[in-house]
Amino acid sequence: MTAERVLRTYLTLVAVSTGASSMIWGINTLFLLDAGLNVAQAFAANAFFTVGMVLFEVPTGVVADTIGRRASYLLGTATLFGTTLLYLWLWRVHAGFGWWAVVSALLGLGFTFFSGATEAWLVDGLHATGYEGSLDAAFAKGQVVNGVAMMAGSIGGGVLAQLTNLGTPYVARALLLTATFAVAWRSMRDIGFTPKTGVSVRGEMTGIVRSSLHHGLHNPRVRWVILAGPFTAGVSAYGFYAAQPYLLHLYGHTTSYAIAGLSAGIVAAAQIAGGLLAPHLLHRQTGAADRRVGVLMGAIVVSGVVIAGIGVVTSFGVALVLLMVWGSMFAAMTPVRQAYLNSHIPSEQRATVLSFDNLVGSAGGVVVQPALGRAADVWGYGPAYLICAVVQLLAVPILSLARRKPVETADAEPLALRP
């Protein structure tokens, strides 16, 4: 397999998995509210999703680093298929919050099989096939494809809900996940990575925890980037899902599900713009590592100001534009952050440390989402968005510490050439 085929396969996997998953992203909060949950409970259910990610990141990291990246991806697809159907059943019977909490945690399990493993599969495959391009550019292409797929899925899901009901997009998601499984089964092969056999799961988990600490928090090159994650991850999750009911309130029609899907599509368009913007932002900085950290800090500040603006405007159109700008900043951050972390993590621990990074970010979401949901219940969505901005900006001083540490230049890393 050539480097071009590895990259093409990665982009295909991103397209099919995001297209399937995003069928519900534009209407998920409305779906939970329609099932009988209040605002605080809806975001608490989302928090249990992140609880699941925290609980299962390390165990699923064992799967990716021992059995293989492909096996982890297939297990994730199968788990998401099952939990999507369970979500649909809970909505139909108007189940109590306890059931939503359990199934949401299992939904988090499905995504932990993806996190780390997919990125690690790409980086290992590119390294093994002699890829000479920029890792930033590879991840940026993935961001663009992710945005296109998300736009199609979220708008399609919103329109489908408008024409039928809020449950139909979940049926469509389950069907598309079966297609995702088939594509991964046929096209995905572990390259540049040899799965471990005959190992103790307990011993491997202990080793993974140690590796996560050693190559993560104990590594000054990535420590502060990881520790800044909880502030941005929690805000991004709340900001995206709260936009659905908030924009409908500004629009004046709380049952216009197609508008909710459109708002998610706007964020997807912003991801495309951000993915295209990221490589150009890097050329405006000096110093390989400082370039990436500087871009992250700048994007966080700008998006913090924008999300505060979302909380104070009263116009649906203005809020929609600000939402797109905010999404662009987050999208620009993603490939830069991915490339920075991957360039400082050994291949053998790549999936482990990336999963650990997702775990730390998810831990922030466990606290931030229900707190902001409660704030929205008490004071409204606007004030909650203002609190979002404050929480997000707390990441800036933490990231600034990463610039004080001596780091290797990107030229020392084969996959980080020509940023």
Image: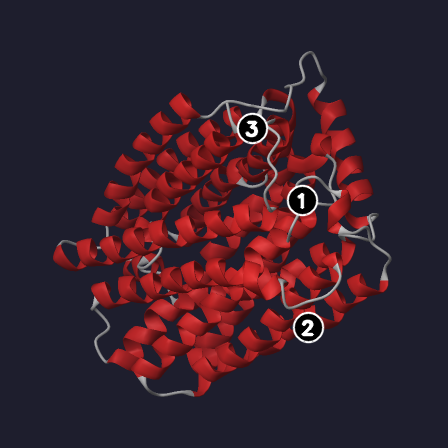
The residue type indicated by label 2 comes to Leu
> Among all residues in the image, which is located at the extreme top?
198
Question: In x, y percent, where is residue 15?
Answer: 37, 43
- Residue pointed to by mark 1: 342
How far apart are labels 1 and 3 at the CA level?
Answer: 16 Å
Q: Along the horizontal axis of the image, is 302 left or right of 102?
A: right
Question: In x, y percent, where is residue 366?
Answer: 58, 57
Q: Are marks 2 and 3 in contact (CB under 8 Å)?
A: no
The residue type indicated by label 3 comes to Arg
Question: In x, y percent, where is residue 382?
Answer: 44, 82
Q: Which mark is residue 394?
A: 2
Whichever of labels 1 and 3 marks the residue nearer the N terminus, that label is: 3
Give the number of the mark in front: 1 or 2: 1
For numbered disc 3, what is the local secondary structure? helix
Which residue sits at x=38%, y=66%?
38
Which residue sits at x=46%, y=26%?
188
- Residue pointed to by mark 3: 69
How far apart are labels 1 and 2 at the CA level?
Answer: 24 Å
The residue type indicated by label 1 comes to Asn
Whichever of labels 2 and 3 marks the residue nearer the N terminus, that label is: 3
Whichever of labels 1 and 2 marks the residue nearer the N terminus, that label is: 1
Quadrant of residue 269 within the rendered picture:
bottom left
Q: Which mark is residue 401?
A: none
How far apart are labels 2 and 3 at the CA level?
Answer: 34 Å
For numbered disc 2, what is the local secondary structure? loop
